[in-house]
Image (cartoon, rainbow, N blue to C red):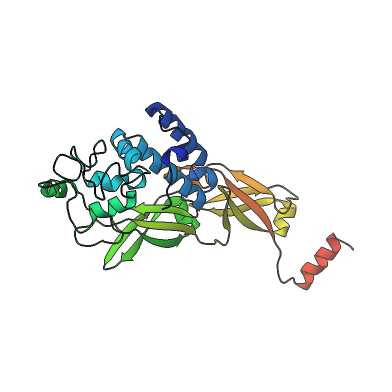
Amino acid sequence: MNSKDFYTILGVSKSATADELKKAYRKLAAQHHPDKHGGTEAATKKFAELSDAYEVLKDPEKRKYYDKFGDQWKQYQQAGVDPDNPFGGGGLGGNGSRSSGAYGGNPFSQGGGADFSDIFETIFSQGGSPFGAGSQARSQQRTRPAKGADLSAAVKITLEEAISGTSRDLRIGSETVTVRIPAGIRPGTKLKVKGKGQAGPDGFTRGDLILKVDHQTHPTLELTDDKLYLNQPVPVATMMLGGSITVNTPGKQIRLNLEEATPNGKVYRIPAMGFPEFRKPDARGPLYVRIQADIPQYLTEEQKALLRQAFPS
C-alpha cells in the first residue's frame, strides 16, 4: 500500500506540539501556495497535500486515530473504534480473555497475530460486528456512510472570464451542476465541488467533483508568470510620427499616447488593469501593453513613392 506520512509532509516529528505543527504548516503553505507558482497542477497538488496533513494533525482526536491506524484512520473513526482500546477490554473473544485465533496478541506487532490489512478487511466485511456480543447495534449507530468515488472534468474559459470570474453548467448523470469559477484563476487550477461526484452503493454518500480549469488561447492577450500582456497592433506611421491610439483592455477602452519613433515591441505599463489575485476581482495587477508594428499587406504606388522618397536606398 502506498502511504504518505503526514508528519514527513509537514517536516515535523511525531512528538510535535500544536504550535510546532501550525508554524510548519504556515511556512510550507506560504512557500507552496499555487498563486506563487502560476496555479500549476504540481503546486496545487502539493498545497492540497499540506492542507490534508495539517487538517488531520491539528485535530487532537483525528491525530490520535492517525497515530494508531495510519492511512485508514478515518474508516476506524467512522466505525466508532476506540483508538486507545481498539478491541475492547477483553479482546475480541467476548469472554474477558484474549482469543488465541486470528486476533490473538497484538495485531499490529511484527510477531504473531493478523496483518493490519487483514484485520481491517475482517472488521468491515459482511456487515458483521467484531466487537463482541451485543455490540452490533451500537456499532451501526456509530458508523457513518462511506464516501463514493470522485469524478473529474475539465473546462476551458476565456482570459476575460478568468479575469472577471464566471460559471459553467455541467451535466453529471441526470443532474445539471452549476460550478462557479472565481476571478483570478490560473490555468491548470483544480476546483472541488463537494457532494457532486459518483454515488456509491445504497446508503453511501456521494464523492466530489474535481474540475480542472484551463485558459483558451486569446488573439491579443496572454498570461505569462502572472503578468497579463496585451499585444497592440499600431500603424507604422503612428509609431514613427507619434500619436494617440485606442487600446481595448479587458473591461474598457483607454487612450494611449505614443511618442515619436516608438520602437517595435515597446511595452507600456498600465496600473490596476491586469490579472487579479485569486478570488479578488478588484485586486488587479498592472496590464502590459506591447506595441507591435502593423505592416500593411498592400501599398498604392503613391505610398510606395513617398516611402522611397523618405527612405532612399
Report if residue 233 is visible in the image: yes
Rendering quarter of residue 124: bottom left
In the picture as drawn, the residue positioned furthest to the front comes out as 100
Q: Position of residue 237 (x, y in %)?
A: 73, 58
Q: Nearer the viewer, residue 13 or 290?
A: 13
Q: Position of residue 271 (x, y in %)?
A: 56, 41
> Residue at 22% of width from left, 53% of height from top?
145
Q: Is residue 54 left or right of residue 257?
A: left
Q: Nearer the viewer, residue 71 or 162?
A: 71
Q: Is residue 197 left or right of residue 39?
A: left
> Residue at 74% of width from left, 70% of height from top?
299
Q: Is residue 108 left or right of residue 267?
A: left
Report if residue 278 is visible in the image: no
Q: Is residue 124 above or below residue 95?
A: below
> Residue at 30% of width from left, 39% of height from top?
65
* Quarter of the image where the C terminus is located: bottom right
Q: Position of residue 173 (x, y in %)?
A: 29, 68
Q: Position of residue 70 (x, y in %)?
A: 36, 43
